[in-house]
Image: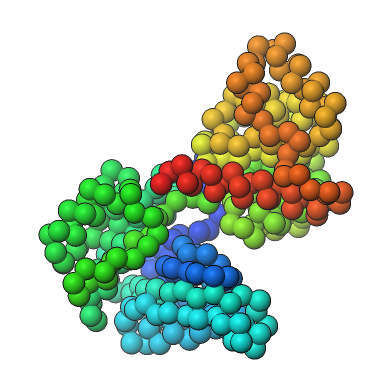
Amino acid sequence: MNMDMNYKKGDTLMNIYEEGVRLLEKKQSFVIASIISSTGSTPRSKGTQMIIREDGSIFGTVGGGKMEASCIEKSLEAIKNKKSFAYYFDLSNKDAYKSAMVCGGSGELLINYISFEDENNLNILRKAAEVIANNKKGWLVTVLRGDAKDFLFVDDNNNLYGQYRGSELMRRKLSHGVERLSIHADAIDDERFIIQKVHSSGKAFIFGAGHVSKEVATILDMIEFETIVMDDREEFANKERFPNSKIVVLDNFEEIGDLGIDDDSYILIITRGHLYDYNVLEWSLKTNAYYIGMIGSATKIEMSYDKLKKEGFTQKDIDRVHAPIGIKLAAKTPAEIAVSIAGQLINERDAKERSLK
């Protein structure tokens, strides 16, 4: 098995916290901009984050257009003044038309200045990156207090990292009830508490590197899934065809091995043949993947299910499978089929996140 980019269990594409750690280790300060509230139609939802570096370059996006341009401008001011703050944005229909955007909502952005001179920042972002790598959850807590700021992290065992210099009441709240707080902001006295959930956006294991898989990987990357593409044909499974995915070239589909599948994994079975699909499906049902989807006709799916039952799989096992994969659309082309598959994964990821709240 040839694993491009040394893919292994817990491995991820560079996420915003890993990029933050990388910059701090290079002694570079930056801003993490986060949408902390939104109403109406906005380019991205609350929780979306972006890094703005000292030279104005970015990692990620908060939606582009006028809002993002303003965000970058304010972030560069924050870097210059070494200050963190929150500000409101309003994409009225008039402003949206002027900036060629179709959105017309409003919301609030946190401009969080992260200095390499404060060792606490490196420790906090390492904790956040570690949580995602290990498929756990935690919370970043930014406390704005006049010109001062506390930057904290709370893990899923309610351990508090970083120095909180505020009230004992809020310290107790952070240590006992953070799991009940989704991405939102609280204000107590002269302190502003902004609490952001840290968790993985999901890993999509795409079996098959054909035309449909190529379109699927492109769309899933846009909606912040990590994508890992597997095939036994190196001429199809390569970085030229899948530039933003990790690549695993299998020896064959009968001996897949341990890929570190966990309950944050989404398995998409889109190989080039019925036999290969069945082999992957049988292997998938022995994992604890959150989602398993398989492409195919009703006849093929029925034949696969009958064979699974003969192999000793139960109806409960079979009920885990989404087949045919995707939401119901009049999809015919690879791109249209990919839209259908992406739509289903969006729904499944949302259901999973709601169950964790």
Depth order, front residue of 262/27: 262
Look at the picture and state if 242 lies above or below 291.
Answer: below
Look at the picture and state if 234 lies above or below 313.
Answer: below
Question: Could you say where residue 259 lies in the image, as x and y percent from the top left?
Answer: 58, 35
Which residue is rendered at x = 50% and y = 69% of the image?
A: 39
Question: Could you say where residue 124 lies in the image, as x and y percent from the top left?
Answer: 32, 60
**Residue that sits furthest to the left in the current view:** 168
Look at the picture and state if 79 lies above or below 228.
Answer: below
Depth order, front residue of 273/89: 89
Q: Left of 318 or right of it: where is 107?
A: left
Image quadrant where residue 230 sits: top right
Q: Left of 62 or right of it: where is 230?
A: right
Which residue is rendered at x = 61% and y = 75% of the image?
A: 103
Depth order, front residue of 245/1: 245
Which residue is rendered at x = 61% and y = 87% of the image?
A: 94
Look at the picture and state if 300 lies above or below 20.
Answer: above
Quick check: can you spot residue 202?
A: no
Depth order, front residue of 285/101: 101
Question: Could you say where residue 77 lies in the image, as x and y percent from the top left?
Answer: 40, 87
Q: How many marks?
A: 0
Quick check: can you spot residue 292?
A: yes
Which residue is rendered at x = 65% and y = 11% of the image?
A: 312
For the N terminus, the image quarter is top right
The color scheme shown is: rainbow
Question: Could you say where residue 340 lies in the image, as x and y percent from the top left?
Answer: 74, 49
